[in-house]
């Protein structure tokens, strides 16, 4: 695929690609350094699962450009470990983005998302349609982050589980 792309201008954190799908306001708040996620029990649990569920696998953790942190597991796939399948779409696009990021560096990989609590795995790889959509998403993320104020809070089904809930909805 021949993409006209200045990736350096568009690249961002993997977590921001994830938040783009969850909530644009959350994306904006996170970008401005309002980072309350550490207080979320689910996030801590997710991190714990990540560290323990596959402790016997051979893996290499790689931090690239201080933007994406990925696990390369034996066999060469990039792996994400997720606590639940509720945010499947966001999780999938985050991993697509990691694969795309690596591809810009000349490294082609496939991805696998592990849901240890559900004992499920999902295998993914890039296609031309996904590459094109990712470029649109990265441009849209830039637009959201350039807004002078956060997008308005809209009640979403998962707001009560969000670390920003009080911030968004207390009077
Ligand atoms: S509480 Fe809801 S509106 Fe506020 S940042 Fe979280 S998901 Fe978005």
Image (cartoon, rainbow, N blue to C red):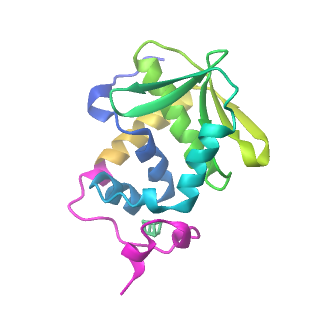
Q: Quadrant of the C terminus?
A: bottom left
Q: Residue furthest left?
A: 148
Residue 144 on the magenta segment: yes
Say which residue appears at 46% left-offset and 52% top-offset.
19
Q: Please state which of residues 62 and 77 is positioned toward the viewer in this rendering.
A: 62
**Residue 27, picture quadrant:** bottom left
Please, is residue 25 above or below residue 116 in the view? Answer: below
Q: Residue furthest right?
A: 119
Please, is residue 3 above or below residue 44 in the view? Answer: above
Say which residue appears at 62% left-offset and 26% top-offset.
125
Whether residue 66 is visible, yes or no, is: yes
Q: Residue furthest bottom?
A: 171
Task: Tell me residue 15's x, y (percent).
Answer: 44, 44
Q: Please state which of residues 166 and 40 is positioned toward the viewer in this rendering.
A: 40
Task: Tell me residue 127's x, y (percent).
Answer: 58, 25
**Secondary structure predominantly adopted by residues drawn in magenta:** loop
Say which residue appears at 39% left-offset and 61% top-offset.
36
Q: Which residues are magenta?
A: 143-171
Quadrant for ligand 1 reads bottom left
Task: Tell me residue 156's x, y (percent).
Answer: 53, 70
Residue 95 on the magenta segment: no
Please, is residue 50 above or below residue 99 in the view? Answer: below
Q: Please state which of residues 156 and 68 is positioned toward the viewer in this rendering.
A: 68
């Amino acid at each position: 695929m021949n993409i006209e792309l200045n990736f350096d201008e568009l690249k961002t954190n993997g977590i921001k690609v994830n938040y783009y799908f969850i909530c644009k306001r959350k994306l904006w708040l996170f970008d401005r350094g309002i980072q309350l996620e550490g207080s979320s029990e689910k996030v801590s649990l997710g991190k714990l699962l990540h560290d323990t569920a596959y402790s016997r696998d051979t893996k290499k953790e790689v931090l690239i450009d201080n933007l994406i942190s990925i696990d390369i597991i034996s066999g060469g796939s990039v792996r994400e470990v997720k606590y639940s399948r509720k945010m499947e779409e966001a999780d999938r696009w985050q991993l697509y983005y990691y694969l795309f990021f690596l591809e810009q560096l000349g490294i082609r990989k496939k991805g696998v998302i592990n849901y240890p609590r559900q004992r499920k795995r999902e295998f993914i790889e890039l296609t031309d349609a996904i590459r094109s959509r990712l470029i649109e998403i990265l441009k849209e993320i830039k637009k959201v982050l350039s807004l002078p104020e956060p997008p308005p809070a809209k009640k979403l089904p998962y707001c009560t589980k969000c670390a920003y809930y009080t911030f968004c909805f207390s009077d």
